[in-house]
Image (cartoon, helix red, strand yellow):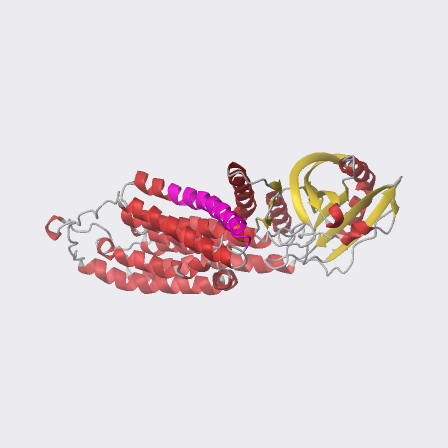
Amino acid sequence: MNQAVPIPSSPASAAAWRVALPALALAFLLVLVLFRETAMAMASIWVRSDTYAHGLIVPPLTLWLIWRKRASLALLAPTHSYWALVLLAGAGFAWLVGEVAAVNALSQFALIFILIFIVPVVLGWRVARCLAFPLCFLLFAVPFGDFTQPKLMEWTAHFTVLGLRLTGIPVYSEGQHLIIPTGSWSVVEACSGVRYLIASVTVGTLFAYLTYHSLARRLTFVAISILVPIVANWGRAYMIVMLGHLSGNKLAVGVDHLIYGWVFFGIVIMAMFWIGARWREDELPQPQPSRVLPTVAVTAGAASVWVAAVASVLVASLWPFAERQLAHATGGSLSRMASLEAIDGWQPTPSALNEWRPRFGDYAASTQASFENGGHLAGLFLAYYRNQDQQHKMVSSMNVLVTNDDPVWAKVAGGTREISFNQQPIQVSTTQLRGPGGIRLVVWQWYWVNGQWTSSDALVKAYTALSRLTGKGDDSAVIVLYAPQGQAGEGDAVLADFARAAGPAVSSALQQTLATR
């Protein structure tokens, strides 16, 4: 391996760096102050969540990666680029959309991009290209990835069932719940492997950058760092169930299975890095001073560097100001929804159906009722949201029909279907729940956002952002219909009839509540 040789910089370039670095640092500091709520929200998640604790070391690692580039940076003279303000403004607008739509990840990614784009504004594109990976590595500081949990849990449950059956162990599965002769198991959030996946991708990306130089090898190793923890988690889940089964549920239960899981994951990841290191590429030779050409660059004056830094802060500050203006255009407080009108053919009735309640919270008002028609029962739940923010919003990972650790109710199936509601076709999410005494509920769920109907979480965010940006507020509601599945499986037919009859009453109640804004 060739030894790196220090490369002298020109006096003009060194003088430019002495001006540019304080300007850049001050711009970063002021932007973090402007967006302090977003920055503190990220930091609080790093501290309280084991899944995203790696965020605490991402900023120091970024500084270390930049320090490693100091020899290359010494060859470059920082020169500002006002064209980068366009990208900075775009990142600021994305932050605003994230705020009005209450999408934490979008706001946090946008803040990181604002910080990244300040670099070319103050130091120029040549410096930004030199620091491309260290700057982009900051994106790993954003707590992002929870959306993969449902699919990872589904895959883990399927593989565990397959592994048990191939081993000759009879297993009955329903959703993420498994029953074998020695006991029952559930695949919950901690079993999804999302924390293993995020940790592997973060460390794997850094390892690929430091170990390889060709883009093909780097991308290959990053792809492997995504695939390996997913497959390893399947093996981990199967191993834990087998340990519990073979030991009479004395091993791999309670906290033990988490400890065994981390040990197994650690061994797998270490093996992945050991194998990856066998194809490492040595450091590229550093240019010798005798072969270095004089830096051809126009060194920006001190005044222009500070003007660029001030310009970046001013452009960034536009978006918190815009967000505060939109926040003033909120609706009045809401304590109760408008009453439901009579539903043709269906009569209100007290019912045990109301023992189940969707796990939606932080709403402004809600209503739940049961109805009967010719011996058929159906339930209705409405939760109305107004003046949402990052902590109080309709669509979030906390608002679900039933939690995975619910001791009474469990989700056993899901899908989508099209129904007729208020004389228009609507796509809804369908779920089947198993409850106490073997009762099963068929559940339909969708959303209403200022007159728009959808079952898509992404479209809810888009409609909410558009509504708030156009000054129409963020009034939204979740609609949940449910009915017993019945011996003959007539629950869907009962709900279809109830949805057609309840459409006008539900739409009227939502519009009347909206009118109180």
So how many labels did they put on this image? 0
Q: Quarter of the image containing the C terminus?
A: bottom right
Which is nearer the eye, 11 or 115?
115
| In this view, 312 is above or below 157 | below
Residue furthest to the left in view is 290
Quadrant for residue 11, please give it: bottom left
Residue at (22% x, 61% y) in the render: 14
Quadrant for residue 178, please give it: top right
The answer to whether residue 512 of the structure is visible from this angle is no
Residue at (48% x, 64% y) in the render: 47
| In magenta stretch: residue 248 | yes
Residue 2 in picture, x, y percent from top left: 15, 50
| In magenta stretch: residue 227 | yes
Q: Is residue 324 left or right of residue 51?
A: right
Highlighted magenta segment, given as a residue range: 223-249
Q: Magenta region's main secondary structure?
A: helix
Residue 376 in picture, x, y percent from top left: 85, 40
The answer to whether residue 246 of the structure is visible from this angle is yes
| In this view, 62 is above or below 377 | below
Q: Is residue 220 left or right of residue 390?
A: left
| In this view, 513 is above or below 214 | below
